[in-house]
Image (spheres, grey):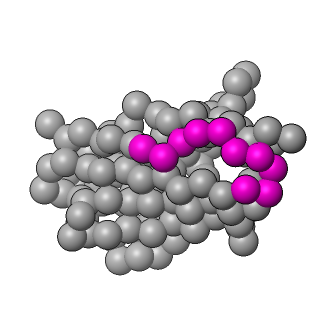
């Protein structure tokens, strides 16, 4: 059973920075696409950024140039560095592990990020 444990959320002022981490258990991390999604109150969950097993990254237009996703396969961990935060970045951030050939599509429990104006 894979578990995703997120950490690093919190409260920050506009323009500030936060870093999120997501540690995965299990043996398939290296073949998984790892992603960060977010869901604001009253809105649908949306992709923030993801990174493939070979390090190809993709970002939502709203975070390009401000957020950076990275992964450490030796630690089974994916990171999201968030800079120049805006109030509209306020949401619950979820880690996702996706490996369709292994039948894997797991979600973390979510971590709250609040950006005050």
Q: Residue at x 18, y 57 (%)?
A: 28
Rendered view: 64 above or below 110: below
Q: Position of residue 68 (x, y in %)?
A: 58, 68
Q: Is residue 61 left or right of residue 55?
A: right
Left or right, 48 with reference to 77: right
Left or right, residue 33 beside residue 42? left
Residue drawn at (14%, 36%), measured in percent from left and top?
Answer: 1
Q: Is residue 62 visible?
A: no
Give the camera-side residue of 37 and 81: 81
Q: Is 79 drawn above or below residue 70 in the view shown?
A: above
Estimate the x, y position of residue 105 in percent, counting from the top left: 33, 42
Residue 25 point in image, percent of width and height: 19, 48
Residue 17: % across, % down = 66, 58
Chain part drawn in magenta: 7-16
Point out the image quarter for the C terminus: top right
Residue under the point 13% across and 56% down: 27
Q: Is residue 2 visible?
A: yes
Residue 9 included in the magenta stretch of the image: yes
């Amino acid at each position: 059973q894979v578990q995703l444990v997120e950490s690093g959320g919190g409260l920050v002022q506009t323009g500030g920075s936060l870093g999120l981490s997501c540690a995965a258990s299990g043996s398939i991390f290296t073949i998984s696409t790892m992603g960060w999604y977010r869901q604001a109150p009253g809105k649908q969950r949306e992709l923030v950024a993801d990174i493939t097993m070979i390090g190809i990254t993709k970002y939502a237009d709203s975070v390009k140039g401000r957020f950076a996703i990275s992964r450490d396969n030796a630690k089974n961990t994916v990171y999201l560095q968030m800079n120049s935060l805006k109030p509209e970045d306020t949401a619950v951030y979820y880690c996702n592990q996706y490996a369709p050939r292994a039948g894997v599509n797991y979600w973390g429990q979510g971590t709250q990020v609040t950006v005050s104006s």
